[in-house]
Image: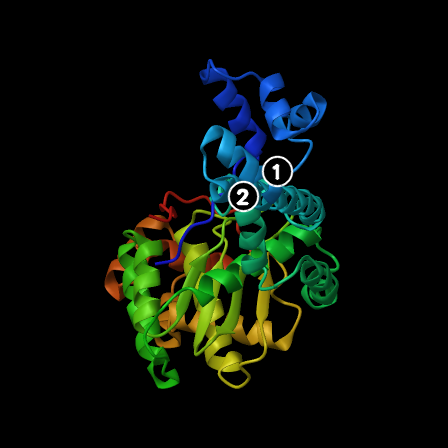
Amino acid sequence: MTKTTITPFEATHPGTLIKDELEVRNDISQKDLAKEMGVKASFLNEIIKGKRPLTADYAIILEKILEIPADYWLRFQAQYEIDKARIKQKNIDRIRNIEIWEIIKKYVPIKYFKKFNYLSDSLEKDIQAILNIYGISTIDGLVNSVARNKFSLYRKSEKLQLDEMNLLAWYSIAIYEANHQNVNAFHLDCMDKLCIALNQLFFTNHQTIENTKRVLNQFGVKFIIVPKLDKTPIDGFAFWSNENPAIALTIRHNRIDNFAFTVMHEIGHIALHLSKNKHTEFIDFHKDRHESIVEKEANLFAINKLIPESIWNKIALYEFPINDDIILDLGLRFKINPAIIQGRICFEIDSYAIKTTINKTLF
């Protein structure tokens, strides 16, 4: 069993014991003790006040006078020196932690990490928590990580207003949480079955986030919800985590159509892109999905998986926009959430101002 070392608030000098002994004894005063020890009263007073060490010579003398073993006095003195050294080191460590924390606050949104219980009341533990989340071992690693990731994370989003510190925090939490998630083995040839299972739970829209995670985990895909930060307009993030693909989302809008499309979009990245290159990553920013070929490919994947082309061709026979009653009937007929059908129609006619009574809430 490992013995726990406790550092006292204050080191106790053996002179304290001399003082205590003199106070309880009626037969000897401090002046008398100094005389018997053969030292000046001022010399003994300095020992009592902890200004001088108690040497082996005086430990033997005290053994004779006070009948307290010399080795006890020496152990007391040795423990005092040890405690004093530990307190000094503790103070050095405390000051260093304060200095490190001041640097961390320049690169990390501390209030965000506190709000979502990543931090405690211990500065030492909080520093280690930040290092763990950012995947680094030293404070220099944090500074270098900010500089290294700045270009790669922001180059695709120059037109968006982004908070660099918040974006790196969101990204780091996604990676960190994925690393701590255990799921089944991933098989690319099961992607169609995965999409069918997802569409079923999107249709019922009951405890959808929890059920989405359950289904994705069953098919070997990690799933993380990262709470949103200011000026961090991320919809989704697809990446490879150890032996499994992973999806991280921010629930920017509490809508089933938006949630379903974002999930399928990231699934598209996994099926079309990550499966070919495990070293790439796809961060999808809000209203920034039409910039590249890979984003268009993921969009098309999501569109066709949420509403297969054969079904859409039947829906498209109606004159757009379709009234809510017909959309509800179509949803029941094809087992597709009506909000998803409504969203697809808005996309096709490029108008999102259509009045509707269809409930789009994510449940």
Kindly identify which numbered label has been placed on residue 271: none
Residue 201 vs residue 55: left or right? Answer: left
Residue 191 vs residue 81: left or right? Answer: left
Q: Is residue 328 visible?
A: yes
Residue 217 vs residue 272: left or right? Answer: left
Mark 1 residue element:
loop
Kindly identify which numbered label has been placed on residue 54: 1
Q: Is residue 348 visible?
A: no
Image x and y of residue 260, in percent: 41, 60
Amino acid, disc 2: Leu
* 29 in relation to 190, above or below: above
- CA distance separating discs 1 and 2: 7 Å
* 199 in relation to 129, above or below: below
Q: From the viewer's side, name the closer residue of 32 and 82.
A: 32
* 303 in relation to 117, above or below: below
Q: From the viewer's side, name the closer residue of 175 and 20.
A: 20
Q: Name the outermost residue toward the top.
A: 26
Q: Residues within 10 Å of mark 2 (few under 14, many from 20)?
A: many
Residue drawn at x 67%, y 59% as measured from the top left? 142
Image x and y of residue 276, in percent: 52, 86
Q: Are marks 1 and 2 in contact (CB under 8 Å)?
A: yes
Residue drawn at x 53%, y 47% as measured from the top left? 353
Amino acid, disc 1: Leu
* 67 in relation to 314, above or below: above
Who comes first in sequence, dot 1 or dot 2? 1
Q: Which residue is mark 2?
A: 74
Residue drawn at x 57%, y 55% as measured from the top left? 170
Q: Tell me which corner region of the image, top left, top right, bottom left or bottom right, holds residue 94.
A: top right
